[in-house]
Image: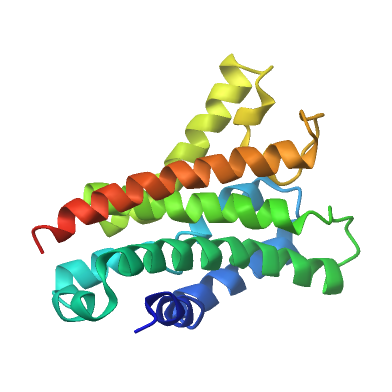
């Protein structure tokens, strides 16, 4: 059984993905790409599609039937990457549509940065959900972390613009290696989250 393919279909075909995409499009059309509301919406809406998928299956007991047919590693990686890809695609697709059919606001054509940023927030929500065993932590945890980074940057470490999440997809400062530097940073953060996710899920599966 191809666990990743199944998870991708479930993530992109979920009601939560559609709701998140429509909400992101609505926010863009109402407030624009540069608005604070859009910036806040990214960590919140990217958690909707698939960040609680493992938790739902674990709590319902469905995992006991599904896991033997997919294998542990395939199961965990399928959940992780489906969560990240669907979460990253959500704001990227919304911004692409806005750039094509919006009201003419200038849009930075850096959809890869936006995708990776959304992917990071999505997998962060998944890690928090697994660690806390709570859907509410999944949907609110990324926002809390986002807000903490904003506070740290604006009040205490204004020189560390890499802490400011909006810089990750709409940079206003000169980064080392340019966009490549941002990509490497986000890839590293996602890799760290992947290690945490695998460790947490594998430990839980030992008792499933």
In what quadrant of the picture does the N terminus appear?
Answer: bottom left
Q: How many marks?
A: 0
Q: Is residue 128 left or right of residue 61?
A: right
- Between 31 and 176, the one nearer to me in the picture: 176
94 w.r.t. 1: above or below? above
Q: Residue at x 37, y 55 (%)?
A: 126
Residue 60 in the image: state x and y as whole percent: 16, 74
Residue 109 in the image: state x and y as whole percent: 84, 56
Q: Is residue 171 left or right of residue 196?
A: right
Corner quadrant of residue 202: bottom left
Q: Is residue 51 left or right of residue 37?
A: left
Residue at the extreme left: 207
Residue 100 visible in rendering: yes
Residue 113 in the image: state x and y as whole percent: 70, 51
Chosen colour scheme: rainbow
Residue 166 visible in rendering: no
119 w.r.t. 14: above or below? above
Q: Residue at x 65, y 53 (%)?
A: 38
- Between 166 and 195, the one nearer to me in the picture: 195
In what quadrant of the picture does the C terminus appear?
Answer: bottom left
Q: Residue at x 39, y 81 (%)?
A: 2
Residue 76 in the image: state x and y as whole percent: 33, 63
93 w.r.t. 135: above or below? below
161 w.r.t. 69: above or below? above
Q: Is residue 103 left or right of residue 15?
A: right
Q: Residue at x 58, y 61 (%)?
A: 88
């Amino acid at each position: 059984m191809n666990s990743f393919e199944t998870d991708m279909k479930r993530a992109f075909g979920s009601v939560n993905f559609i709701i998140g995409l429509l909400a992101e499009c609505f926010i863009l059309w109402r407030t624009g790409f540069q608005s604070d509301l859009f910036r806040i919406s990214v960590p919140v809406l990217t958690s909707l599609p698939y960040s609680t998928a493992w938790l739902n299956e674990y709590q319902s007991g469905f995992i006991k039937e599904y896991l033997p047919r997919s294998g542990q590693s395939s199961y965990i990686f399928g959940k992780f990457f489906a969560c990240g890809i669907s979460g990253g695609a959500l704001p990227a697709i919304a911004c692409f549509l806005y750039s094509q059919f919006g009201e003419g606001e200038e849009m930075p054509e850096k959809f890869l940065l936006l995708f990776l940023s959304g992917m990071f927030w999505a997998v962060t929500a998944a890690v928090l959900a697994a660690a806390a065993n709570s859907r509410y932590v999944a949907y609110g945890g990324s926002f809390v972390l986002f807000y903490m980074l904003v506070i740290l940057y604006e009040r205490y470490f204004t020189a560390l613009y890499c802490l400011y999440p909006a810089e990750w997809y709409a940079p206003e400062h000169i980064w080392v290696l340019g966009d490549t530097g941002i990509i490497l940073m986000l890839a590293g953060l996602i890799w760290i989250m992947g290690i945490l996710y695998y460790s947490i899920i594998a430990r839980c599966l030992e008792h499933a």
